[in-house]
Image (cartoon, grey):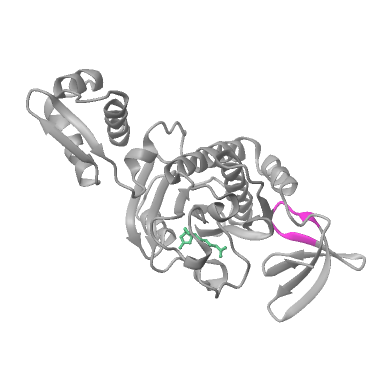
Amino acid sequence: MKEAEVDGRILELFRSGDGFVSGEALSRLLGLSRTAVWKHVNALRSAGYLIEAVPAKGYRLLDSPRLLNKHDIGQGLTTRRIGANLVCLKETESTNSVAFKMAEEGACEGTVVIADGQSAGKGRLGRIWLSPAGVNLYCSIVLRPPISPMAACQLTFLSAVAVARAIENCSELTPQIKWPNDVLIGGKKVAGLLNEMNAETEKVNFVVLGIGVNLNVRLSQLGGTLRYPATSLIEESGVEVDRVAFTRTLLTEIDDLYDRFLVEGEGAIRNEWLERSAMRGRQVKVSVGERQFAGVVQGVDQFGALLVLVGDKVETVLSGDVSLI
Ligand code: BTN
């Protein structure tokens, strides 16, 4: 068992009983020495769990931390690759920057960096992603796909579809995807995705999938300076989201889609992306640098570019801002 799995199992045992669990029982059930059990209990305490120890009775869990933490997220997580290494931080500038640095230093595929809050969350096109602590999900995932840099933008489909699926699993809401990589509810942005890559001419070294989802943030906390209408799951449904359950669901969906991507290629994921797209067949306004034009969205190509029919010509839009007319 991995370290995080042992911690998760200990928490499970604490929660399944109604009182104390003896050190002897823990050691027998986990197949560990009493000293190893004691070390795990102390690691959980350092992570914020309040665990009482009473001689001749054993251990009892009195309280759990409200921060997103790897013990809770790892509990019952049955992914193949994603979450192989789970790092949860209280606060950092940007989980993408942390994950990128870790990947440069050799972090394995499936490494996930999560922060409770970000002081300099990065958005697309050099913008800021507002990241108040304790309410949302900010996470970055290291992938090492055996693909060319040209094909890496296909991974943008993957995280958008995974977020949309996770929202559907954890709420009654119906999300839509807007090119290039926003997830919307009722036309308002609920999640943003920022992929960053390290590559050579022929091969990708690693990609960091950056995912920010507004879960329990109130609009008043985001302020009135956003460039686009924003929302959160709690604003839309009135129900507080269990951040741990949402994170686990999202990691599971990413694991599933990435597996499919490696086996079948991007086709299946692109089709689901298109089905969920808020733009297919709609009139849009496109801004690419100084250039602006309007047209009707036809779809996306296999490199993630938006195909827009302008007059009788199809324009291929690789980057820029697109809004529905
Ligand atoms: C966008 O502009 O829509 C993309 C926003 C991406 C935000 C996420 S939050 C987790 C990860 N860390 C960052 O600094 N950015 C991404």
What is the number of callouts on the image?
0
Q: Is residue 51 in the magenta section?
A: no
Residue 113 in picture, x, y percent from top left? 39, 51
Relative height, residue 110 to residue 222 (above, below): above
Residue, x 53% and y 64% (percent of image)? 219
Q: Quadrant of the C terminus?
A: bottom right
Q: Is residue 283 visible?
A: yes
In the image as oriented, which residue stretches furthest toward the left? 55
Residue, x 29% and y 46% (percent of image)? 65
Residue 97 position by quadrant: bottom left
Q: Image check: 146 left or right of 115?
A: right
Residue 82 in picture, x, y percent from top left? 46, 40
In the image as oriented, which residue stretches furthest toward the bottom? 290
Q: Is residue 199 visible?
A: no
Residue 84 in picture, x, y percent from top left? 39, 39
Relative height, residue 92 to residue 87 (above, below): below
Q: Is residue 300 in the magenta section?
A: yes
Residue 132 in picture, x, y percent from top left? 42, 63
In the image as oriented, which residue stretches furthest toward the front? 238
Residue, x 52% and y 66% (percent of image)? 123
Numbered range of the magenta stretch: 298-307
Relative height, residue 38 to residue 167 (above, below): above
Judging depth in this view, the residue of 194 and 261 nearest the camera is 194
Judging depth in this view, the residue of 204 and 283 nearest the camera is 283
Residue 9 position by quadrant: top left
Residue, x 71% and y 47% (percent of image)? 276
Q: Image check: 234 left or right of 184?
A: left
Q: Quadrant of the N terminus?
A: top left
